[in-house]
Image (cartoon, rainbow, N blue to C red):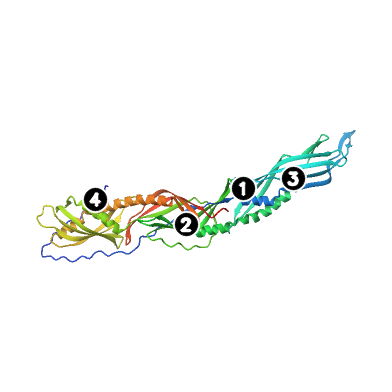
Amino acid sequence: MPTIGRTLFPVVACLPILSACHERQAVSPPPRAADPVPVPRQSSVLTVPIEGEAEIIRRAIETAIPKLLWSIDEPATQCIPPQRVKLLGKRIKITPKITCAIHGTVSRHAIRLRGEGQDIVADMPISARISARDVRGLLKGETATGVAMAHARIRLILTSDWRLTGGIKLSYDWTTPPGIDFLGQRIRFAEKADEKLQPIVRQLERDLPRHLSQVHLRTKVEHLWRQGFTTLELNERNPAVWMRLTPQKLLYGGYVLQENKLRLDLGLAALTETFVGPRPTDPTPTPLLPPAHTHANGSFALMIPVTADYAELEPVILRALHKRAARPFELPKLGPIVARFDKLTAYGTTGNRIAVGVTLAARPADSKLGDTHGTVWLTARPVNQPNSALVHFEDLQVTGTSDGIGGDILIALAGSPAFSSVIADALSQNFTHDLEDLKGKIRRAIGERKTPHFRIRTNLDSTEIGQISAHGQGLYLPVRATGRAAIRYAGGPL
């Protein structure tokens, strides 16, 4: 892997070699930091469609509109008015009025629901069967039949206290108006049926809100709201990663009726927090707020914490130093230096810096003298470029102690780009591997998660890598993942 460290590290000038009579001061290790890895918080909107059978609406209409819409029983009504002709400028009656008895029924048949945008349309077939008998015996009980199609157009309304109500408009037309032909004229009975229909329309408008209240939507939404205050496991171990959801408000973007399913399009605006380590406590539920009337786009944001524990980093860095020690380090003015690395300690120190202590032995490659042993300490700020997991160091500081007059060789070696870039390379490779591994784990983990009350499904579309930082608990590389997420409520139908 190419390193950034070689181009960014300043060359540390070699310090003068001290005389044999010079006594070195003991160097204390840098102080250990105790600050935890930060808990990232993001605002997300998860779509939470609540779906249920539209049977409650069909039942409301079925209950409000009886199967027998009305009966007609009029013993004496004018069927045909008297006919007149104009003769010599005067209108002369030539036929008497026809008075008849009308009997019959108008019934509705099974109601079918369908959706048209925000309208729920109830199609209701109507049939009429009407007989007429002339009291004078001219009509012998002729029967008229007719067919109409009524349409109840319903628009649901969600109130501020999470209750469903609605308005209704009912229209219909006679595809075959009921009537009979007598004496060359058409006797129509549709007007008689129309008179009976208007009170039923008004009754349905009054009764529909009462029937919709049986949905008990608020109870279901409150249950969903409370269950949203939860924690989901994103990664089981190495490291354990948790996402905590804290709902902020519920969004309402309307409804749709499809295949006899009524779906309310809700959205859960929530804070998503990511934790590394033990499972955090669930947030405390807050009271349900009124709905915010806006569309939920399902935009999802999550901070993925790519962390590295210092204890896990130590063998990674030490192995890299062992591999590099197979060839001499070229130092300005000192030439090739042969080194052996025995022990390494890494931890977070103050000021967002990492401390690396290396116990080593070194000597010039052409020297006949023995090795100089000692411990050197490097402290530096780990940094990375935007959207890159490659790590380099800034503000490098080196201190150390040794057992001989060549101690400055150890200081010069530790401060050289050749040495520090090995550590940067090891960290870069570790974070790049961990990042891809963790992204894959989290994609699988939150692609679909089930709880006893709902199912969350997430698609991660893109990631953005933030700035690496050093903390007492480990190195932290924040990665912001964005995508779309939906929660499917598992609490049963409406």
Tell me which numbered mark, 2 or 4, is placed earlier along the sequence: 4
7 lies left or right of 436: left
Tell me which numbered mark, 1 or 3, is placed earlier along the sequence: 3
- Residue 443 x %, y %: 41, 50
164 lies left or right of 413: right
Q: Which residue is mark 2?
A: 270
Q: Nearer the viewer, residue 445 or 197?
A: 445
Asked whether the residues under the numbered discs 2 and 4 touch, taking CB atoms below 8 Å apart as contact, a structural biologist would say no
Say what secondary structure mark 3 lies in: strand
Q: Which residue is mark 3?
A: 106
Q: Nearer the viewer, residue 490 or 41?
A: 490
2 lies left or right of 249: left
Front of the two marks 4 and 3: 3
Q: Give the amino acid type for the residue marked by disc 2 in the picture.
A: Ala
Say what secondary structure mark 1 lies in: strand
Disc 2 residue crowd, few under 14, some 14–19, many 20+, Cα 10 Å? many
Disc 4 residue crowd, few under 14, some 14–19, many 20+, Cα 10 Å? some
Q: What is the distance, in whole Å, between disc 4 and disc 3 at their CAs?
A: 93 Å
Q: Which residue is mark 1?
A: 120
